[in-house]
Each structure stands twice: as structure tokens, then as C-alpha cells.
């Protein structure tokens, strides 16, 4: 008997939430049900998701930035079909295969001249773990400095550099020698590096949690402080890289040259888990310093042929379709529309970011009924107001977004980099509608009804 995927999906349709609740993460299923996000998606194409009833949803989250090329890009999909048909000799392990070398060549060519080597892994967190190891070995130091509100992954080393206490709680003790400094505070960073026992300053060019941005002056001073104290500057480009901010790497906005760069998420077009740590020849040779140390760092699936094919095809699409330039132009247009919207809606305090990594910060207006409603909602739970944006965008307009972090009223936009005028118009009009209704007070009751109905459905089941 052969495996029939279509038959399995058809026979088991509608069991999604129940299976997750019973066998995987019951709290995730509970959250999705409570907010009414419990949909049965059956197809993804371009900037859109489709559920079993045929409804279309604009995906302004793109899998946390994974689907830079949208879903089901035909070039990447065809490349993977070709790879399977060729029966490539995958993961021989005692081997130097061609495709990993070609992808390393393509990535190094897109970085600054000081980046000369690539080390592959399976995720952004794994790339960050490699950066920690290589920085410690290269410098002979143990300390790691990171920023508050940072997010670098959830494996143990990366978790030690997580700026969110909720993520770290109960998993300690974590990596010794790691300590946080405020993001954008050059004085605090210089004090932390002054002891000269820090191997690396690990930092996101734009923080994913909150979409926080620092000045060009800060970045140039930070790079100088690292160089002066012998600390390696690690740019975590897992989310900001691959064109997300309108440059291939976000560090390019600041005129700096990091010692190590991590990349993942969009690297394989969303098809195969993949990540890479890019570094100088000097850093790599400190780790792989002899024949005996040839295998001191590796990962079983890191150079698998399907991930390498997907990465090469993705980069080819970036070149052929001018993806980075499109992201820059679309981001400028979208931010312009959103800033015009902010002039009419006092609830929308700030629009920030670069390219198609955008944060919308909401705040209490100075006076009026909208101010009172904002205060009442925030009295229930800090950061709750932003759910009054995310939930109706989904239910009224079938637009998928996310709150940027716990306890902050920031909604993050990470649309596919192929988004265009149609997607801008859909989103801006929808947000205008939601903000207009919020100012008048109706949406608070609408969201309350959604949560109440979901709770009743849970009890009934």
C-alpha cells in the first residue's frame, strides 16, 4: 500500500486543534481558539492563505518572515522537484558536496569583504549557537553581551541572550558570562565591554520584539567599541536579513561591517529548515585549526541537498525579480500610507522600521472617550490593547498580523517581499476601518463577543 497524502488530509480534516491539544501543545490550541484564530488552512499562494471554505487571508506575517518570496514560489518548488528527481547523494557526511559550496559562495558574495566563510545549520537559533561557540574560541573569552528585549532563539545558548523574562523563566541556570545592556545605549555598551572579557556583542540590527530601531550614530559607535576592546560584533540577521529591510543585510543601513552574521528564515524560500553563520576566515580557522579539529563543529542535516537547492533557487529569484529593491520600494510606500493614517488616528502613535519590517505602536490619546477606553483595556492587562487591532483585522478583514511582543502595544508587519500595491491598499483600508471603530468604542464589545463565543465552544467540546 502506498502513502496517499491527499487521502490522509481529506480523511483527517478538521482534527487540527484536537490533535495539537491532545498530543502537542494544548496551550497554543487554547490561545488560537480563544482569539478565534482556529482556521483550517488548506493552501498558500503568494501573499495569501486559503481555508477549507475557500476564504482568502492576506498574510502580513509570512511565517515570521520565512516566506519572503510568498508561499509556493514556482521557481523554488520546481528546483526541489528537480532535486528529488535527480536522486542526489544526500548527506554522505564523509564528503564535500558541491551544492553547499555553491550556496556558501553565493552568501559570502552578498556580504561585506570581511565575511569569507559559511557554516550551515538548520535554524536561526542554531546559527546563533554557532556564533557563540566560534566567538568564544576565536577570542579566548567567555563573556557575551546582548540587548534587552532581544530575541535570538530558544535553544539554551540563544535563550541566555533572550531579553524576555517569560521565555527564560524556569530554564536556568543558563550560559554563564552573558549580560544585557539597553538597546541603543552606547554608554552602557562601552561599560560592559570595558573589562575586555567579552567574546561577542550579539545584536539584531532591528529588534524583532517591538521593532525597535537605533540610530546610525549608535551603530557606528558600537562597532568602534567592539573593535577597540577586541570584542566580535555579531549581527543577528535571522529576521532582518535576506532583503527584509530593503537591503540584503540590514547592517548595510548603518555603514558597519560585523565580524559574524547569522541568517536563516527566508534562506530556503520557506520549504526546508536552513540557516547559516557567516564569518571571517580568521574566526573559522581558530575553530577548525587542525586536521584533528576538522569536525569539532557540525550538524547532521546542516548541508542537506534539499536545503542547499532551495537556498540557491531562492537567491536566484532574489536576483531575477529584484526582490530587495521591491521590498525597499514597497516598504517606503506602505510606511508613507501608514504615517498618513497616523495623522488622522491619535491611537496610532508611531510607525517605524525599515523596508517591510514595520512596527505600529499604539498609545493612549491625550483626551476624550478613546483615551478612557484605552486606559480601561490596559488596566486589565498591559499590552492588551494591541489585540483590539489584531483580532478584528483577522475576523473582519481576514488579515493575519501579530503583536510584536508581550506587554507592548506594538503590532508587527512582516509581509512577503513580493507584496505590492494591492496588498498595501487592502491593509491600509482595513486598519483605517479598525481604528475608526476603535475610536467610537464598538470594537471592544466585538472582540469581547469573539472571546466569549470561543470560550463557550471550548466548554461545549
Image (cartoon, helix red, strand yellow):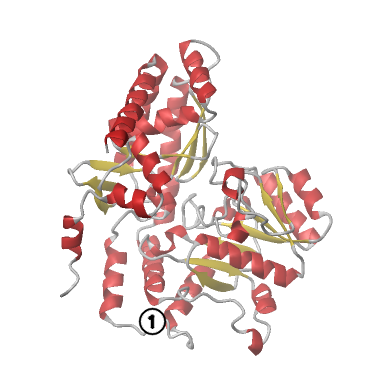
x%, y% of residue 76? 32, 65
The residue carrying mark 1 is 90
Classify the position of the C terminus by image quarter.
top left
Q: Is residue 133 above or below residue 20?
A: below
Query: Image quarter for residue 332?
Result: top left
163, 303: nearer the viewer? 163
183, 224: nearer the viewer? 183
Q: Is residue 404 above or below residue 13?
A: above
For the point 23% across and 46% down, the residue is 51
For the point 65% across and 84% down, the residue is 293
For the point 59% across and 73% down, the residue is 116
**Can residue 430 be seen?**
no
x%, y% of residue 30? 38, 41
x%, y% of residue 391? 37, 32
Classify the position of the N terminus by image quarter.
bottom left
58, 256: nearer the viewer? 58
- 333 displayed left or right of 161: left
Query: Around disc 1, counting alpha carbons within 10 Å, would you say few (fewer than 14), some (14 to 19), or many (20 or more)?
Result: few
Amino acid at each position: 500500500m502506498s502513502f496517499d497524502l491527499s487521502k490522509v488530509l481529506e480523511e483527517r480534516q478538521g482534527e487540527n486543534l484536537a490533535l495539537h491539544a491532545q498530543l502537542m501543545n494544548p496551550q497554543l490550541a487554547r490561545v488560537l481558539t480563544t482569539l478565534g484564530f482556529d482556521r483550517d488552512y488548506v493552501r498558500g499562494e503568494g501573499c495569501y492563505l486559503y481555508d477549507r471554505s475557500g476564504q482568502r487571508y492576506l498574510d502580513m506575517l509570512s511565517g515570521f518572515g520565512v516566506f519572503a518570496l510568498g508561499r509556493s514560489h514556482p521557481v523554488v518548488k520546481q528546483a526541489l522537484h528537480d532535486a528529488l528527481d535527480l536522486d542526489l547523494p544526500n548527506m554522505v557526511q564523509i564528503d564535500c558536496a558541491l551544492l553547499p559550496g555553491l550556496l556558501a559562495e553565493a552568501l559570502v558574495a552578498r556580504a561585506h569583504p570581511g565575511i569569507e566563510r559559511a557554516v550551515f545549520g538548520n535554524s536561526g537559533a542554531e546559527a546563533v549557537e554557532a556564533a557563540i561557540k566560534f566567538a568564544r574560541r576565536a577570542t579566548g573569552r567567555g563573556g557575551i553581551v546582548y540587548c534587552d528585549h532581544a530575541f535570538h532563539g530558544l535553544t539554551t545558548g540563544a535563550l541566555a541572550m533572550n531579553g524576555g523574562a517569560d521565555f527564560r523563566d524556569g530554564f536556568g541556570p543558563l550560559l554563564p558570562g552573558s549580560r544585557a545592556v539597553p538597546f541603543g545605549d552606547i554608554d552602557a555598551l562601552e561599560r560592559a565591554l570595558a573589562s575586555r572579557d567579552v567574546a561577542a556583542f550579539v545584536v539584531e540590527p532591528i529588534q524583532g520584539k517591538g521593532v525597535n530601531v537605533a540610530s546610525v550614530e549608535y551603530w557606528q559607535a558600537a562597532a568602534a567599541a567592539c573593535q577597540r576592546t577586541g570584542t566580535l560584533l555579531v549581527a543577528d540577521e535571522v529576521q532582518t536579513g535576506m532583503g527584509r529591510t530593503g537591503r540584503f543585510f540590514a547592517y548595510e543601513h548603518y555603514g558597519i561591517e560585523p565580524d559574524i552574521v547569522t541568517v536563516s528564515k527566508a534562506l530556503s524560500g520557506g520549504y526546508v529548515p536552513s540557516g547559516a553563520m557567516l564569518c571571517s576566515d580568521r574566526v573559522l580557522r581558530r575553530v577548525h585549526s587542525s586536521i584533528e579539529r576538522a569536525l569539532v563543529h557540525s550538524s547532521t542535516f546542516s548541508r542537506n541537498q534539499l536545503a542547499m537547492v532551495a537556498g540557491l533557487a531562492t537567491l536566484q529569484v532574489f536576483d531575477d525579480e529584484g526582490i530587495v529593491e521591491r521590498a525597499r520600494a514597497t516598504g517606503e510606500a506602505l510606511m508613507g500610507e501608514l504615517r498618513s493614517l497616523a495623522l488622522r488616528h491619535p491611537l496610532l502613535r508611531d510607525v517605524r522600521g525599515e523596508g517591510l519590517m514595520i512596527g505600529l505602536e499604539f498609545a493612549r490619546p491625550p483626551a476624550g472617550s478613546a483615551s478612557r477606553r484605552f486606559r480601561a483595556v490596559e488596566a486589565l492587562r498591559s499590552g492588551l490593547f494591541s489585540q483590539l487591532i489584531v483580532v478584528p483585522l483577522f475576523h473582519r478583514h481576514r488579515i493575519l498580523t501579530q503583536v510584536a511582543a508581550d506587554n507592548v502595544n506594538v503590532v508587527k508587519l512582516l509581509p512577503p517581499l513580493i507584496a505590492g500595491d494591492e496588498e498595501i491598499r487592502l491593509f491600509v483600508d482595513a486598519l483605517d476601518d479598525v481604528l475608526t471603530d476603535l475610536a467610537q468604542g464598538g470594537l471592544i464589545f466585538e472582540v469581547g463577543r469573539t472571546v466569549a463565543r470561543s470560550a463557550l465552544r471550548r466548554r461545549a467540546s
